[in-house]
Image (cartoon, rainbow, N blue to C red):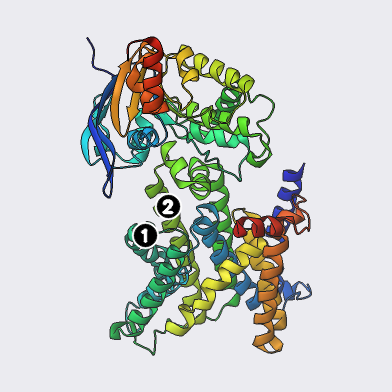
Amino acid sequence: MRSRVLGVVTVAAVALFTLLPLTTTDPARAMGLPALLDRSQLRGLTTISMFVVLTSAWNIIGGLAGYPSFGNVAFFGLGAYATALLTDPDHGHLPLGVGLLASPLVPAVVALVVGFPLLRLRGHYFSIATLGTAIAFGEVINNMDFLGGATGLFPPIIRSDLLFYYLMFGAAALTVGVTWWIMRSRLGHGLVAIRENEEAAAVLGVDTTRYKIIAFVVAAALTGLAGGVFAGWNSFVNRDNVFPVDYSVQMILMAVIGGSGTISGPVVGAVGLEALIQLLAGGSGVYTQILLGVLLAVTVIFLPRGVIDFVIGRSRLTLAHFRRSLRQTSV
Amino acid sequence: MSAPLLALSAVTKRFGGVTALDHVSFDLAEGELVGLIGPNGAGKTTLLNCLSRLYRLDGGSIRFSGMDIAKLGRHEVARLGVGRTFQVVRPFRSMTARENVAIGALFGSDRARLPPREAFRVADEVIDLVGLGGRGHLLVDELTVPDRRHLEVARALATRPRLLLLDEVMAGLNPSEVAEALEVVKRIHASGIAILVIEHVMQVIVGICPRVVVLHFGKVLLEGDPSTVLKDPRVVEAYLGERYARRVRGSRGDG
C-alpha cells in the first residue's frame, strides 16, 4: 500500500518535471499553451536537480556505507574539469557529448586510487582526510597551467537552458535509479551491514574493502557527471566554482535532514533545502546559513533519521532520541 | 586417516609484551563438537579472533580444510566456511532480526551466497531453527538479551558454515534459557556442522562436548574427555586457585 503510494508519487513527479519545462518551448507557445515557468525558474530547477545528484550520490558512500565523506566536491570538480578540458576550444575542442563521457570516468578512477588509503580510516578520521584531499585537489588544479591555472577553462557556450535542464534531470534520475538498484542488490545489503558493524559484516563474508571502494567509485562517478553537465552549462570552470567546500557540506546537510540511508530522503532534502535557499536568495546569505544550521540542529535532535522517516510515519516528533544519545555520551 | 578440518599448530599471538596465545596446537575433525574452556583472560576469545582472521598471528599457523588462514582476507575465511558469534553481540542495529540473518545467507560461505529473495527465505528457516520464530520482524533493540544471543547464532548459521565458533553464547542466561540454548547447539551439531564452543561455565560444556581443550595463560593446559579433564588438579587449580586445589587434594587424602 505504502509502496504503491510512493510509486504513484514518483511517477507523477517525474512526469511533472519532464513535461513542465516543455511549456517554455516555441512549439508549446505556438499551440497557445501558457508558459508555466520562466527562464530563471528553469535554471533554478536545473540547480535543484544538480543537488539531487550530489546528495543522492553522497548517500551511497555516506548514508549506505556509513563513510561520511566531506570531500565529494572533489569529484564534482574533477568531472567538471574533465568535460571542460575536452570541450574548451583551446584544448580538446571536442563536442559536449564526448566531454560528458569523461566526466564520470575521471573521478571514478581517482576515487579508486585515493579510496584504498582513505577507506582504511573510519569515522571523523575519514571525514577529515576526505576534506583535506578535496582541498588539495582544488589547489593543485588551480596551479596547473595546462588547466588554465586560476583563470580556469572555458567550454563553448551552448545557449539552451532546456538541454542542460534535461541533462541534469537525467543525471538526477540516473542517480536515484542507481541507488534504488543498489538497495535491492547484494551490494546494498552489504553496505548497510558495513555501516552497522564492519567486523561483523566481514566475518559474515562481506568483502568490506571491495564494497567500500565500489560505493566510493559509484558515488564519485555520479557526482562527476553532475560536474560535467555543470561545466557545459556554465561554460566557465575554475577552482572557485567547481571545488567549493560549501558543496560538500551542503550534500551532507541535505542528506541528513532528508534522511540518509534511504532512497527518497536525500531527494527530499536536496529539493526542499535548495528550493528554500533559492527562495531566500533575495535576502542576505547570512540568514540562509543561519536557517540551515538551525534546521540541521532541529532535525538531528528531533528526527535523527531525517524528515522522510517522519513523513512516512515511522518516527514521531519526540525528544526520546536526544535523551538516549545524551545518556549514551554521558556514560 | 583424513586431514582434520581445522589444524592449529603453535599458534602464537602477542599484544605488546603480553603473550596472549603461546604455541597453541590442537585439531578439530569434520563434524566434531569441541569445547574450549579456561578461566577469564586465558585467551579464548583471542584464539577465536585469530581463527576468524580478525587478528594476525605472530607465530604458528592455522589451517582450515587445508588452507592457510594467514594468507586469506577476513571475508575469505567466512567464504571457506568458518562462521562465528561475538561474545559481546554485534547486531546490525538498523535492521530487523530477519534482515540480520539474511545478511548471513546473502554472503557467508560459498555454499550460501544466495540472491536476496532466497536469502530471506533461508533467514526465516534459520530463525525458526534457533527459536526466534515469530520475532523476525522485530528490530534488534526490541529483542530480549537471550534473543540477541540467538540472533548472533542464527546469523552465523545462515552463512552455512562447516565450522561454527560460538563465543560464550550462554553467558548471563538463566538455567532454562541455557537449556534452550543447549538444545539449539545440539540441533546444529546434529546437522553435521563442526562446532567449537567457548564457555566460561564448565557445566555447560560437560553435557554436550565429547572433547574439551583447556586454555590457561595462553597455553593448552590439557585436552581430553570432559569428565577426566575437569577432575584434573591442574584444571581445578587454574579455575579455583592453588589453595582450593590443595584442599581438594587434602580431603581426598592424597595431598
- Residue B228, image quadrant: top left
- Residue A61: in sight, yes or no? yes
Left or right? Give the position of A165 relative to B166.
right
Q: Quadrant of the C terminus of chain B?
A: top left
Q: Position of residue B74 (x, y in %)?
A: 35, 40
Q: Earlier in the sequence, mark 2 or mark 1?
A: 1
Q: Which residue is mark 2?
A: A212
Quadrant containing the N terminus of chain B is top left
Amino acid type, callout 1: Gly
Dot 1, crowdedness within 10 Å: few (<14), some or many (≥20)?
many
Location of residue B159 in the rendering, given as x and y in whole percent from the top left corner:
46, 29
- Tell me: A300 left or right of B234: right
Q: Residue at x 59, y 28 (%)?
A: B173
A270 versus B45 height, above or below? below
Q: Secondary structure at mark 1?
A: helix
Label 2 with label 1: CB-CB less than 8 Å? yes
The residue tagged 1 is A115
Kindly indicate the quadrant of the structure image that contains residue B127.
Answer: top right
> Residue at 78% across / 54% down in the picture?
A316
In this rendering, the answer to whether A327 lies above or below B251 is: below
Task: Chain letter for mark 1, please.
Answer: A
Q: Position of residue B160 (x, y in %)?
A: 45, 24
Mark 2, other Cα within 10 Å: few <14 / some 14–19 / many ≥20: many
Instruction: Give the image quarter of residue A120.
Output: bottom left
Disc 2 marks which amino acid? Answer: Lys
